[in-house]
């Protein structure tokens, strides 16, 4: 009974969780069995965390691109409003444009941390001229959209920073270790003991069925 190492990490994680669940449900107390089961459990959880850590940067890029697009939309709105033929729209547009021009679209090219600082400050400045913002068509909605985009980015960035702080082995390295812990450890042990223990033979059959579905 062995797990095919060529399967995807997600499939490996699913099987490892199922195997650990089945093993613990039996309530067997043999020390080596418990130790091997715990090892698989620990490696699976560590590998899954590493997989999530590796995916976060691409999520950050998408969230950052979203706020960048909204910053460009802000520029277009305030620029058009400042030239509006209606005097009220134009006055409000000029005030809003003055706020935006303090930062400019160039903040979208800053580092993640610097852009966050600038966006927060710009949003606070827009809040300070809320009456003018309401006059400019589409501006309130775009600012609300940027607030939501910024909040989403910051939440994801916090997860990324935590993952980096806890960074250890890569998901690829951990996958190799987990496959070995299963094939040369837990599964090999179950195969051996099942030759003389009917309870372990039943567990072997259960895990074989799970493997077949992977």
Image (tube, grey):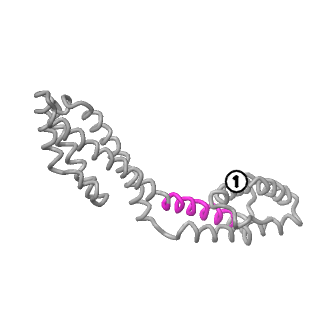
Foreground residue among 1 and 138: 138
Residue 46: percent from left, percent from top:
55, 63
Foreground residue among 81 and 194: 81
- Secondary element at tag 1: helix
Residue 68: percent from left, percent from top:
32, 50
Residue 211 higher or lower than 168, as above or below? above
* Quarter occupied by the C terminus: bottom right
Residue 178, quarter of picture = bottom right
Residue 98: percent from left, percent from top:
12, 43
- Is 117 on the left-hand or right-hand side of 43? left
* Quarter occupied by the N terminus: bottom right
For the stretch drawn in magenta, the main secondary structure is: helix
Q: Tell me if residue 62 is in the magenta stretch.
A: no
In the rendered structure, which segment of residues is drawn in magenta?
A: 36-54
Residue at the (83%, 69%) spot, across then down: 192
Residue 149, quarter of picture = top left
- Is 181 on the left-hand or right-hand side of 59? right
Residue 132 higher or lower than 26, as above or below? above
Residue 88 higher or lower than 66, as above or below? above
Q: Tell me if residue 49 is in the magenta stretch.
A: yes
Residue at the (27%, 55%) spot, across then down: 115
Q: Which residue is mark 1?
A: 18
Residue furthest front in the image: 85
Foreground residue among 135 and 17: 135
- Is 87 on the left-hand or right-hand side of 201? left
Residue at the (34%, 41%) spot, across then down: 148
Residue at the (20%, 31%) spot, across then down: 136
Residue 208: percent from left, percent from top:
81, 57
């Amino acid at each position: 009974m062995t797990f095919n190492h060529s399967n995807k990490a997600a499939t490996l994680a699913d099987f490892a969780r199922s195997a650990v669940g089945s093993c613990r449900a039996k309530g067997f107390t043999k020390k080596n069995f418990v130790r091997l089961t715990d090892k698989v459990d620990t490696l699976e959880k560590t590998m899954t965390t590493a997989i999530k850590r590796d995916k976060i940067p691409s999520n950050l890029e998408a969230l950052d691109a979203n706020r960048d697009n909204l910053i460009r939309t802000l520029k277009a709105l305030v620029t058009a409003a400042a030239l509006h033929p209606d005097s009220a729209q134009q006055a409000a547009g000029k005030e809003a444009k003055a706020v935006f021009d303090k930062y400019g679209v160039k903040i979208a090219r800053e580092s993640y941390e610097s852009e966050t600082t600038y966006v927060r400050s710009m949003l606070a400045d827009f809040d300070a001229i809320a009456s003018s913002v309401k006059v400019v068509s589409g501006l309130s909605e775009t600012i609300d959209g940027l607030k939501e985009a910024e909040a989403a980015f910051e939440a994801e960035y916090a997860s990324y920073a935590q993952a980096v702080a806890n960074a250890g082995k890569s998901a690829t390295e951990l996958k190799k270790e987990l496959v070995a812990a299963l094939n040369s450890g837990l599964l090999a042990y179950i195969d051996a003991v099942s030759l003389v223990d009917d309870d372990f033979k039943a567990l072997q059959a259960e895990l074989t069925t799970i493997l077949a579905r992977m």
